[in-house]
């Protein structure tokens, strides 16, 4: 059965059937009649023909920096589950933290007429800014806050500030910091600023000794070794991520430091390992699955929104401090 035959059976025009199938304006009476005819016949529109008419597919791209990450897996689970409920398939692109690959995936999804893209954990580059400004493909950013772009992000600053307050309340006065690259506005810049705000409150120099690390355990370990050489009297290590903290704890133990008696350590992200290592890691829990769900909801709303002049939605998610043994 084709669309014309369905229209004849329902007693309406083929244009009315087309509007019904593509979410166009239609009276409730005609919508009811066409729905009954679809249910009676089991009619399914041809996907290829529908794509040619609408210039879009039921595929949503999800571009992530890597796969071996709890934050990525939680976010992807939240986004893909909600998208599936709305009838969209999720196609994954892994950039390897390479901005050029990230941009290539966005262009690929645009060329293949994807419905839209959820972009996770990005660094704003001129190429990305230009792509987003053109607005040819609906994009929602997850995990970062970019001006003028629909996004869902975490309170990185607030979480880092509260963790620093917790460490300072333990009487620590010689803290150091292991952070991420500051082109990463969330994990790099906002978290570092939160730590510095906490130190100011405690009457300490906010320009504390710090090292930049990769997001891997080995990066945290190497950064900790450098800080031990620079500041042997350190008594607290504030880390931008849990993996950095795991590496820092390895280096501290190998240097003979007792945790937490001599040195307090905090992370951010609430990875599963934080509850199993000794001492258990004090950290900030971010709601990554909720972030993915919210990003998917914003994207779906943008695909069905009639009012293109509506303000850009930006949603900040909260956090929970998981206070454990490491402080």
Image (spheres, rainbow, N blue to C red):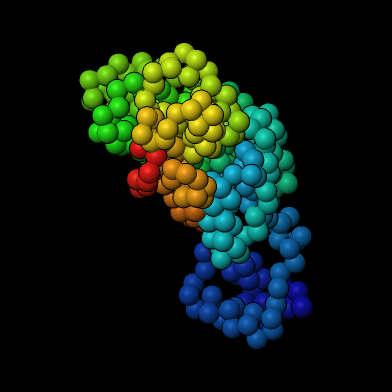
Image coordinates of residue 208 in percent, x first then y, are 37, 17
Q: Tally the numbered discs.
A: 0
Q: Nearer the viewer, residue 11 or 319?
A: 319
* 169 displayed left or right of 242: left
Quadrant of the frame with the C terminus: top left
Q: Residue at x 62, y 60 (%)?
A: 88
Does residue 13 appear in this view? yes
Does residue 188 appear in this view? no
Q: Is residue 91 above or below residue 122?
A: below
Q: Nearer the viewer, residue 24 or 321?
A: 321
Q: Nearer the viewer, residue 290 or 205?
A: 205
Q: Nearer the viewer, residue 93 or 235?
A: 235
Q: Residue at x 38, y 36 (%)?
A: 260
* 183 displayed left or right of 167: right
* 104 displayed left or right of 214: right
Image coordinates of residue 75 in percent, x first then y, are 54, 50
Q: Residue at x 57, y 41 (%)?
A: 119
Q: Residue at x 53, y 21 (%)?
A: 225
Q: Is residue 1 above or below residue 107?
A: below
Q: Is residue 29 above or below residue 196?
A: below
């Amino acid at each position: 059965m084709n669309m014309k035959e369905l229209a004849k059976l329902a007693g309406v025009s083929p244009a009315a059937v087309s509007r019904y199938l593509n979410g166009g304006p239609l009276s409730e009476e005609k919508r009811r009649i066409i729905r009954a005819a679809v249910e009676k016949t089991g009619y399914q529109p041809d996907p290829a023909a529908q794509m040619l008419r609408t210039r879009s597919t039921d595929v949503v791209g999800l571009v992530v920096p890597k796969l071996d990450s709890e934050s990525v897996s939680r976010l992807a689970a939240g986004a893909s589950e909600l998208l599936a409920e709305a009838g969209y398939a999720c196609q994954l692109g892994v950039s390897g933290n390479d901005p050029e690959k990230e941009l290539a995936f966005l262009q690929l999804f645009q060329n293949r007429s994807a419905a839209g893209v959820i972009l996770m954990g990005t660094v704003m580059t001129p190429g990305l800014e230009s792509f987003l400004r053109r607005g040819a493909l609906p994009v929602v950013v997850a995990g970062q806050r970019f001006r003028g772009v629909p996004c869902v992000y975490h309170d990185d600053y607030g979480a880092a500030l509260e963790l620093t307050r917790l460490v300072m309340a333990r009487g620590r006065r010689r803290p150091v910091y292991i952070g991420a690259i500051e082109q990463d506005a969330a994990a790099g810049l906002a978290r570092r600023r939160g730590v510095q705000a906490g130190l100011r409150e405690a009457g300490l120099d906010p320009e504390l000794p710090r090292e930049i690390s990769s997001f891997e355990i080995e990066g945290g370990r190497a950064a900790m070794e450098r800080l031990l050489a620079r500041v042997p009297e350190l008594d607290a290590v504030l880390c931008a991520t849990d993996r950095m903290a795991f590496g820092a704890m390895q280096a501290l133990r190998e240097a003979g430091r007792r945790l937490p008696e001599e040195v307090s350590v905090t992370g951010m992200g609430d990875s599963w390992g934080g509850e199993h290592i000794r001492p258990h890691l004090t950290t900030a829990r971010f709601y990554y699955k909720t972030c993915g769900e919210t990003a998917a909801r914003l994207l779906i709303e943008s695909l069905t929104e009639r009012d293109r002049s509506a303000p850009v939605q930006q949603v900040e998610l909260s956090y929970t401090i998981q206070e454990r043994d490491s402080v």
